[in-house]
Amino acid sequence: MARGACRMPVALPAAGSQAGRRALPRWWEGITLRITSELAQPIADRAVTILQRNVNIMDEDGVIVASGDPTRIGSFHQAAAQVIRSNRRLDIYPGDEERWVGVRPGVNLPIQVDGRTVGVVGITGPPDQVGPFGELIREMVSLALMQRRAEELERVRLMARESFLRTLLTSKGPIGERMVQDAPLYDLSPDSAYQVLLCQGPRGTDGLSRIWAESEWLAQRLQRGGIDRITFAGPWNGLGVVIATDPPRDLSAVLLEALPKGFAVAGGLIGRGLVGLRRSYETALQSFAAGRLHGNPVALSAYRLRLSRLLTTLPPSEVAEFVAGMLGGLPAADSREGRLLRETVLAYAEEGLNSTGAADRLGIHRHTLVHRLGAIAERSGTDPRCWEGLLSLYLAIQLERLFGQSVEYGLQ
C-alpha cells in the first residue's frame, strides 16, 4: 500500500522505555506471528524445485501447512511437535520413523522469532547433508514472518494514528493528559507548528478517494515544493486532511497547485502544539464554510477570511433570530425582487456608501439605486444609507447565505 510511505515516520519505542511500556501493548497486542499456508507454500515450492527434496513447513501446533507433497498438508507431524516443545533441532535417521507419527528421515529445525518458536522446517534426506539447507529455509521463513509482522504493525499503527488524530482534532473541550502523553508516539510535538489543510474533490466523483489511496504521489509533489513533513488522514465527511509540520507559510495555494484540477482546498491558521493543531483544523473547516460568501473559490485561506469565519461560529439559533429580525420585511432571497435588493445592499456596502460606484457595479442608473435603498429602509425598518444600518443589513445577508453551509459542515 502506497499510503504508508508518505505518512509521518514514527520510530518504535524501545521495549524497556516508558514510552515502549505504554505503546507496545496497544500496537502489538493481537499481532500474532502465525505461519500460514499462504506465506509458507511459495517458500516450500521454491526450495523443492532447487533442492529436489521434499520440504515441510509446520505451524506452532505441529500441523503441516506447506509441503512439496500436497497430500501431507494438514497432517500432524509428531517430530515437529517435539521440536516446538524443546526448541531444539531434531534429526530423524532411517529406522527412527517407527518412533514418530507422520515423519520421514531428515532434519527438523525450530523457526524462532524474538525468542519464541512459531513453527518448524523439515527437509527430507540424510540429516548431515540437508541440515545446512534447512537452516537457509528456516531463515527464509523467519524473514517472511518478520516482514508480515512489520506490514501488520504498520497497518495497526496507521489505524491508531488515524483514530488519535480524529479524536484530537474533532473533540471539544480541553485536551486530556493521556492524549498529551501519547502525542509523541505519533510524532506530534508541543514545540512544532502545524497547519491543517482540507481538500474536497470534484462533486459527484471519487477523485478524493483515489488521490488519498495513492497519497505518496501527492506527497512527492509537495516535497518538491519544499514541504518535507506531511501527514495524510481521512477522508472524514468527504474532506481529505493534510497536516504540514513547521510550514514556512500558508500552504493553501501550494497544495491546490499540487492537486488535480477541480479540487478545492481550505487552509487553517498555523498554530503550535496540540492546541494549535486543533485550532488549525477548526479554522480550516470554518474557511470551507465561509467560502460560500465568496463564490466557493478553490483556494481558501483562514488568513484572508477572518470576518467570514467569525460569522460561521455564531450559534444557528441566534443567526436565525438576527436574520429574521433584519431581513424579515424583505422579499425572500430566492425571489427576483429579494435577490435584487440584497445585491443592492452588498454593492453599496462594498463601494463604501458611494452611490455612483454601487450603481455602476450593479449596471443601473443612480436614481434606481436611490429608489432601491429607500425601499429597503421602508420594508426592513433599517436604513442602509447610514453606516450602522448598512453594516447590520450586510452582515444579515452574509449570515443568510452562510447558514446552510454551516449546517452542512457541522459548525453548530
Image: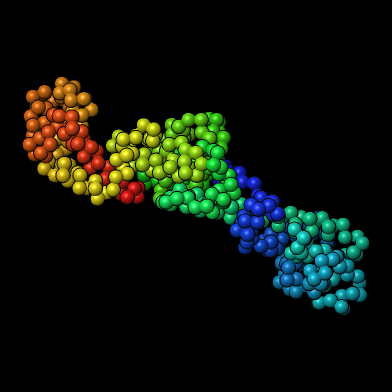
Residue 356 shown left or right of residue 243 in the figure: left
Image coordinates for residue 338, horizontal then vertical, percent: 14, 39
> Taking the image as drawn, is residue 366 in sight?
yes
Q: Tell me which residue sits at (43%, 42%) in the image.
A: 279
Image coordinates for residue 103, horizontal then vertical, percent: 82, 72
Residue located farthest toward the top when viewing the structure as drawn? 356
Q: How is the image coloured?
A: rainbow
Residue located farthest toward the bottom when viewing the structure as drawn? 98
- Depth check: give the residue in front, 355 or 218: 355
Residue 82 shown left or right of residue 398 in the figure: right
Q: Tell me which residue sits at (50%, 49%) in the image.
A: 165
Quadrant in which residue 16 is drawn:
bottom right
- Depth check: give the residue in front, 394 or 331: 394
- Depth check: give the residue in front, 122 or 182: 182
Q: Tell me which residue sits at (32%, 50%) in the image.
A: 412
The vertical placement of 295 against 313, above or below, is above
Residue 312 shown left or right of residue 64 in the figure: left
Residue 323 shown left or right of residue 266 in the figure: left
> Taking the image as drawn, is residue 199 in sight?
no
Image coordinates for residue 394, horizontal then vertical, percent: 21, 35
Q: Tell me which residue sits at (50%, 47%) in the image.
A: 233
Q: How many marks?
A: 0
Image coordinates for residue 248, horizontal then vertical, percent: 51, 30
The vertical placement of 116 against 389, above or below, is below
